[in-house]
Image: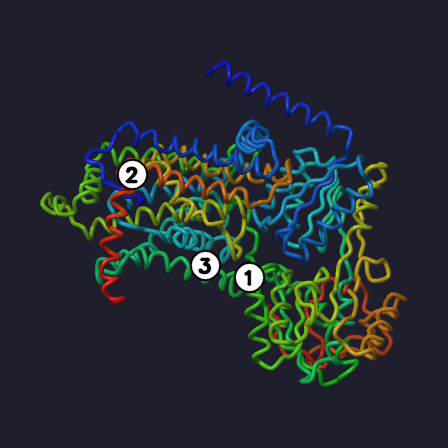
Amino acid sequence: MKKLLIALMTTVAALSVVATAEAADKLKACWVYTGPIGDFGYSYQHDQGRLQVEKALGDKVETAYLENVSEGPDADRAFERLAREKCKIIFGTSFGFMDAEVKVAKKFPKVMFEHATGYKTGKNLGIYNARFYEGRYVLGQIAAKESKKGLAGYIVSFPIPEVVMGINSFILGAQSVNPDFKVKIVWVNSWFDPGKEADAAKALFDQGADIIVQHTDSTAALQVAEERKLHGFGQSSDMIKFAPNAQLTALTDEWGPYYISRVKAALDGTWKPDNVWLGIKDGAVKLAPFTNMPDDVKAMAEATTKKIAGGWNPFTGPVSKQDGTPWLKDGEVADDGTLLGMNFYVKGIDDKLPQ
Amino acid sequence: MRIELVKRPQRSALFSMLSPFIAFALTIIAGAIMFALLGVNPLDAFNIYFIQPISEVWQLHELAIKAAPLILIAVGLSVCYKANIWNIGAEGQFIFGAIFGSIIPVLFPQFEGPFVIPLMLLLGMIGGALYASIPAFLKTRFSTNEILTSLMLVYVAQLFLDWLVRGPWRDPQGHGFPQTIQFGDWAVLPQLMPDDGRANWGFVFALVAAVAIWLMMSRMLKGFEVRVLGSSPRAGRFAGFGFNRMVFFTFLLSGALAGLAGISEVSGAIGQLQPVISPGYGFTAIIVAFLGRLNPLGIVAAGLVLALTYLGGEAVQTALGISDKVARVFQGMLLFFVLGCDTLIHYRIRLIGLALTNGAAKLEAAPKLEEAR
């Protein structure tokens, strides 16, 4: 028995030595996701980016990830674990990981950290984000054309600037088509909770909305739209498989090119903490094929997408705040700083921003 | 053929002790099959799952962080369960302890000094005990079923915390995120060895509580009272032990310990209140209590094992790319085998033979024939 045990332990030890020796020459790139990679939305899309890195850089890299990490003490441990497991570059993909990443980045100065959608940086902590609001303007225009009742239901997670600017951009787009367009908002207070998201979609449809928009990660709301024979938009990834008749388009995130460039920089030794905000122009925000809509709506959506890719900003004046006070003068364009700290609604939104 | 459970006239003392070990071994075997089916070398997987997490100092700290609330809660619950009183709502008492303890850092952040932490811990215990007194009161006054009331109060506590951190207690500078302000330096439970890892005093509280409850149960009259009332309420009454007093005692004790776990977790590991502060510690602690055979010292070991399944689950994710569900599968299997083994201590399996079954079938079939005619 004892001999067996010793034999067993030596094998185990030998195995782990081989594993580490193999890994030594490669650069290890790691990801932390807030949801399961099977959400077919936000986390799934980040994981697609990770797979593209593996594909593009082949045997120069190895990757690892932790999924479904809750934003709290478990996040601290997740980043610490990856840093200790010899990850050279670590991407945290949710706003709520910010403080955990800041803490761990200080503790491991030689590891490169990147945080998506946050605002705190450090000597070895860069931030990256996508201009989702650009796509949301196009969604707003489509919604205003396609909704018969002039009322959209909007399912949202947390009242952080990114979400608020999405709502604003959406309503600005919708108002450019139908000035009286209205939106009803439901906060589900979670990024990924299919049950709550589906309930919110049902409630919004019951209250008269006939089109649904979401800033949450699952396919649940769109599936409700499919059941009710109404329309909606996919979020983060193309969800057409889940709602072939309901999805008008999807606001998709393409992280692959960015991840590849960052991991390459880490390999070359040229990595520096960055602060980038990528949009339609950079290919980081994409709209899935326009489906289930007439040709004229499709043409309008394509034209607007092109216009934004050409450098036009949806937050171009004149725009008033919710209470009617002017915000942007005619032709004035909102600066990035204001957008990133956005905590107010624009005119035409019938909801009170949770304070 | 039919399987029947027949009560054993006597239960084996040896196997009562061995049962958790057998259960653990069975879990390992079933786990090996699972890993093999996933296409991973089981030896590799077990090395990463069970050995690596305890071979590095920082991971031992993480283990202590995870185990501390489990042990604290389970130790309290063990007293309840020994007395045959079923507090299922430790999760809610955990949350209320956290809320009560957070009153100081959230509402009076300017109050600083060495008294802050002891006061917070005390408030946490009071909060947990108060919340546990509700099902105790309902049981003694209205004879309600404490399993139901304590369980349902968990959801009340979760929603109350949710409301607090979204509403009155929300950090005004938190970008709308539902969380309170970060606790000040004086309100953070100190770490044991900050140079090596993050483990805080919560783990020490857990060990102290386990030893104290063990002494109480094995050496003091109160422990005897608990055991007598638990195994035979009638005999307890003859001995002059009050059942209602016992209900309150066990609920308040387990509630206070759960509350202490709650405030320790929030103050030591999280540093602020947020909508979710526990990944189900209050429920996992029930598994821990039974895995530890309701013995406080056994519970310490069981708490460490359960904590290991969490850490190991993360380790196999990064090392082997296996889904995060593996940890839950392991915990489920462990509980299943523990309960299975325990059942077999009290009962033995009897296979009812084929012949007898046929005979019974004929007997049953006869009236049907009658009806058919």
Q: Residue furthest front?
A: B373
Q: Label 1 amino acid?
A: Arg
A15 lies left or right of B221: right
Inter-mark Cα distance, 1 to 3: 16 Å
Q: In the image shown, does A214 or A326 lie closer to the viewer?
A: A214
The mark that comes first in sequence, 2 or 3, is 3
For disc 2, the chain is B
Chain containing the residue with disc 3 = B
Q: Secondary structure at mark 3?
A: helix
Point 56% across, 57% down: residue: B179
Q: SS class of the residue under badge 2?
A: strand
Res. B158 mark: 3
Residue at screen point 39% across, 40% down? B288
B16 w.r.t. A76: above or below = above
Residues indicated by labels 1 and 2 sit on the same polypeptide chain: yes
Q: Please state which amino acid type lies under the numbered disc 2.
A: Ile
Between B120 and B37, the one nearer to me in the picture: B37
Image coordinates of residue A95 in percent, x first then y, are 67, 55
**Image quadrant in which the C terminus of chain A is located:** bottom right
Image spot of residue B330 (x, y percent): 49, 40
Q: Is residue A248 visible?
A: yes
Dot 1 falls on which chain?
Answer: B
Q: CA distance from mark 1 to mark 2?
A: 57 Å
Judging by the rendered image, the residue that carries numbered circle 2 is B349
User: Label 3 amino acid?
Assistant: Gln
Outermost residue, left side: B238
Q: Which mark is residue B170?
A: 1
